[in-house]
Image (cartoon, grey):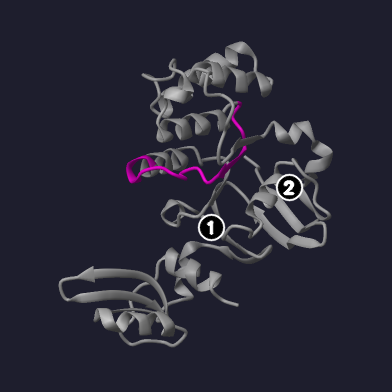
Amino acid sequence: MKNKLEVKGVSKVYGNVKVLSDITFVLENGIYGLIGPNGAGKSTLIRLITTLEKNDEGTILYNGENVVELQKNFRSKIGFMPQSQKGYDNFSGTHFLYYMATLKGMEKQQADIEINHLVKQVGLEESIHRKIKTYSGGMKQRLMFAQALLNNPKIVILDEPTSGLDPYERIRLRNYISEVAENRIVLLATHVMQDIESIAKEVLLLKDGILLFKGSTTVLIEELEGNIFEKIITESDLQQYQKEYKISRVTRTDMGVCVRCIDTKKHSDWVLANLEDVYLYYMSKS
């Protein structure tokens, strides 16, 4: 099924600050990780894609048509999970999902079928009739994920979906995301590299409003081949290593302090890079 989102030369200015500059990429079915530090422009890009705001330059196309002109027809194809959803604590989970289904213009019969399915899919059957204020953080995130999938959206945008979750809930939600990615575009904005390293088709790396990279995690990681090394040092040497290298991890062992370092020079005793190494490397570049 055709499902293509094109962002062409998109820029956005707030006052005198250009928060996005000439952003261009194409998304098709699959999971994409949107990564970058606070202030990189991730939230602004999400608002432009969801038509909550208008871009100052460039165009955004869905299956070849301008999303601004499509308006409601395009918005109906989007499922959005914000970083936090406030104001519904006194709703039960069921009430909240039916409320969101109404906002999306769903018929009662369709809402019944989808809500029943989604509640089971995210494992909330036993708690769905309780008030949201009694939910754990993981349960709230699973509920927000379920509402994003109402009305069978073709584009699902998730803003920091695992923020504040413990490792078990993070893995659980990540697995749910993988399950629903078929025949959909899933854009996942996150600071947690583990969330996307194993499931993302490609990553989009934003810094200071500029798209530094778009491609597979494998290609991104291969760019640092030979530049990552690990070494056991003494505690007294740690400060010097921190001055000399970018350090992505420090682990204290019985043998000493194990440091994982990123260096622009090639090392014969290099180890495989991971996405966290890549993120630190690009974010610390001037």
Q: Measured along the vertical axis of the image, is residue 243 above or below residue 4? A: below
Q: Is residue 74 left or right of residue 147?
A: right
Q: Measured along the vertical axis of the image, is residue 48 above or below residue 244? A: above
Calculate the distance from the C-alpha at mark 1 to the C-alpha at mark 2.
20 Å
Residue 227, visible in the rendered structure? no
Q: Residue at x 69, y 48 (%)?
A: 5
Look at the image and say whether residue 161 sits in the magenta stretch: yes
The amino acid type, in three-letter code, at marker 2 is Leu
Q: Residue 253 appears in which quarter of the rendering?
A: bottom left
Q: Residue at x 38, y 77 (%)?
A: 261
Give the mark count.
Answer: 2
Rendered-image quadrant of the N terminus:
top right
The amino acid type, in three-letter code, at marker 1 is Glu
Rendered-image quadrant of the C terminus:
bottom right
Q: Which residues are magenta?
A: 151-169
Position in image of residue 268 (x %, y %): 33, 87
Q: Residue 244 appears in which quarter of the rendering?
A: bottom left
Position in image of residue 111 (x %, y %): 57, 17
Q: Residue at x 59, y 29 (%)?
A: 152
Q: Measured along the vertical axis of the image, is residue 281 above or below residue 185? A: below
Q: Which mark is residue 202?
A: 1
Asked whether 248 or 149 is in front, the reply is 248
- Mark 2 crowd level (few <14, some 14–19, many ≥20, 10 Å Cα): many
- Mark 1 crowd level (few <14, some 14–19, many ≥20, 10 Å Cα): many
Residue under label 2, please give it. 48
